[in-house]
């Protein structure tokens, strides 16, 4: 089944923007939301240059505002219905990577990351599943992280914890949807170039470009597997090894 009509959150930059470009190349209609509306407007122009035949809907959204998430998702549903289309897929992508070690003055930034990456994701998944249950089909995609498999130090501490929570929440939804026409996928990206990785002083290992990463992400999403590691090499193998890493090894991440 081709998922033609897609909602992407956090679409103004990074992985969201990269995925939007790849889906545009494939002829998908897109509903894009983010806090930075001026970047969304610029992205729409770029996407229409890639493929002038697709439909693109834009709305501002701060995913930490639960009522706004429901309002925007249902508005996108109405947008698609006006052109005779359903919502086929929702990609829960919006996220933050701010913060630092606990007890060192980063409480506000850590809380912002927790509210966006976990509570915001919960709101998005609630709204998406409400739509999918009503229409009895759809594909929910949670963009987690390879950091979700172990606790990590410093600026990765809260980020990793939120991505672990998202992983667990998506798996629970997947269990709920067994033998139903609603699919739930979790994507575990490794290091893909973005604004978040640009903020890291030392380039992380095995990082790939945004263009390559976005292409691989969309390929993984379209396969609709329960869990996908992007790129497969080396991160699938890291996944197998991570339970055996000592705390001293994790300290160097």
Image: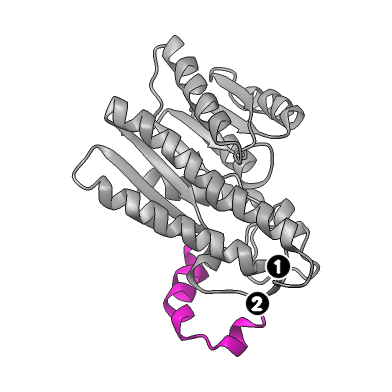
Residue found 65% across the figure and 75% down from its top: 153
Residue underneath mark 2: 253
The N terminus sits in image quarter: top left
* Residue 208 image-quadrant placement: bottom right
The spot of residue 197 in percent (x, y) is 71, 59
The spot of residue 193 in percent (x, y) is 68, 56
- Is 233 displayed left or right of 112 in the figure? left
The spot of residue 74 in percent (x, y) is 47, 23
Task: Indicate which label's residue lies in the foreground, 2 or 1.
Answer: 1
Front-most of residues 201 and 115: 115
**Image height of 44 relative to 100, above or below:** above
Front-most of residues 120 and 236: 120
* Residue 199 image-quadrant placement: bottom right
Q: Residues within 10 Å of mark 1 (few under 14, many from 20)?
A: some
Assign the magenta stretch its main secondary structure. helix
**Image height of 104 relative to 187, above or below:** below
Q: Residues within 10 Å of mark 2 (few under 14, many from 20)?
A: few
What's drawn in magenta, residue-wise? 228-253
The answer to whether residue 232 is seen in the rendering is yes
Query: Magenta span has 231?
Result: yes
The answer to whether residue 30 is seen in the rendering is no
Query: Magenta span has 43?
Result: no
Q: Secondary structure at mark 1?
A: helix
**Image height of 55 relative to 160, above or below:** above
């Amino acid at each position: 089944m081709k998922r033609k009509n897609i909602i992407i959150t956090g679409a103004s930059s990074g992985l969201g923007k990269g995925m939007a470009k790849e889906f545009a190349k494939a002829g998908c209609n897109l509903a894009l939301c983010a806090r930075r509306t001026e970047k969304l407007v610029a992205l729409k122009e770029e996407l229409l240059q890639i493929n002038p035949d697709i439909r693109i809907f834009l709305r501002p959204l701060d995913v930490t505002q639960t009522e706004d998430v429901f309002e925007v998702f249902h508005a996108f549903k109405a947008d698609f219905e006006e052109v005779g289309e359903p919502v086929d897929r929702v990609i829960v992508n919006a996220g933050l990577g701010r913060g630092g070690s606990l007890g060192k003055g980063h409480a506000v930034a850590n809380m912002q990351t927790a509210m966006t990456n976990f509570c915001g994701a919960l709101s998005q998944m609630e709204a998406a599943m409400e739509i999918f249950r009503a229409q009895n089909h759809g594909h929910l995609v949670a963009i987690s992280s390879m950091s979700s498999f172990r606790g990590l130090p410093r600026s990765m501490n809260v980020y990793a914890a939120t991505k672990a929570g998202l992983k667990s929440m998506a798996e629970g939804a997947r269990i709920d949807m067994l033998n139903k026409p609603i699919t739930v996928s979790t994507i575990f990206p490794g290091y893909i170039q973005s604004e978040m990785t640009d903020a890291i002083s030392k380039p992380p290992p095995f990082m790939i470009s945004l263009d390559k990463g976005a292409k691989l992400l969309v390929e993984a999403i379209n396969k609709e597997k329960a869990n996908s590691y992007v790129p497969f090499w080396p991160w699938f193998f890291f996944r197998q090894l991570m339970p055996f890493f000592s705390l001293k090894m994790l300290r160097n991440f």
